[in-house]
Image: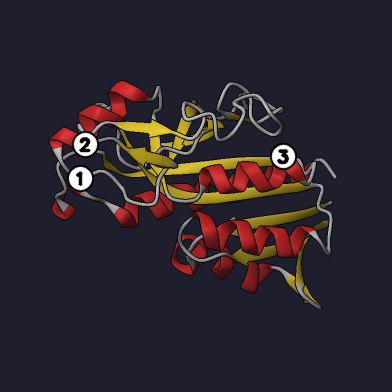
Amino acid sequence: MKVLIVSATPFELAPLMKLLESQGVPREQSIFYGLLEIQTLITGVGSTATAFALGHTFAKQKFDLAIQAGIGGAFDPEVRLGTVFNIVSEQFGDLGVEEADGSFTDVFELELMQASAPPFTEGKLLNPAGEAGFLPSAKGLTVNKVHGSEKSIAAIRKKYDADIESMEGAAFFYACLLASQPFLELRSISNHVEPRNRENWDLPKAIDELNKTLIELLDTIKSQL
């Protein structure tokens, strides 16, 4: 089974890479972990870098499964930092125009794009695989500028029904859907979407829990081959 593991930055996958270096068998551009053939792709931060990297990769290769693994912010302040979610839907949260009154109108409302033209479904990108029983499910929102003020957070929460904010998720969904590539997005919560305060973040915990979940998933798949 051939698996592509995608992340924006190398540090988000560092624990997994340490495991693969010690237990995997490198062969050309892959690492064999049991019968799993694993490739990793560090796209860079943001939708533009992610879309290009995936388009370039999918034009050359097909995978049995593509997994995006990364951190994100939770809109719900009750969500525990380090919780890992399976993202079942994504949408772009800042693709559009700012109106004179400061409100935001997206490209679907502007009728610059059709909300249900493939790969979109009513303005959203949906994973056909749906929920994964081993993880809680969540809805993603992808932005170029993460929200860090009370006013902007209130506005985006009013406009979109989303649970988690990231900078790459929708680009990953978009590329996978257009390439007919089976996929899964895992997001570990590093922070809450609140007035910006880095002291409240816990990146080490989020990355540790993300990689524990990712390794557990790979071990489960490997055991079934």
Q: Residue 12, percent across and down? A: 46, 60
Q: Residue 56, percent across and down? A: 72, 65
Q: Which residue is mark 2?
A: 152
Q: Which residue is mark 3?
A: 177
Identify which amino acid the numbered label 3 is placed on: Leu
Mark 3: give few (<14), some (14-19) or many (20+) Cα within 10 Å: some
Name the residue furthest front: 100
Mark 3 → mark 2, Cα distance in angstroms: 30 Å
Cβ atoms under marks 1 and 2 closer than 8 Å: yes
Q: Residue 118, percent across and down? A: 71, 32
Task: Let me know if residue 26 appears in the view.
Answer: yes
**Up-down relation of residue 8 to residue 75 (above or below):** below
**Up-down relation of residue 25 to residue 40 (above or below):** below
Between circles 3 and 2, the one closer to the viewer is: 2
Q: Which residue is mark 1?
A: 148
Task: Let me know if residue 7 appears in the view.
Answer: no
**Up-down relation of residue 224 to residue 66 (above or below):** above
Identify which amino acid the numbered label 2 is placed on: Ser
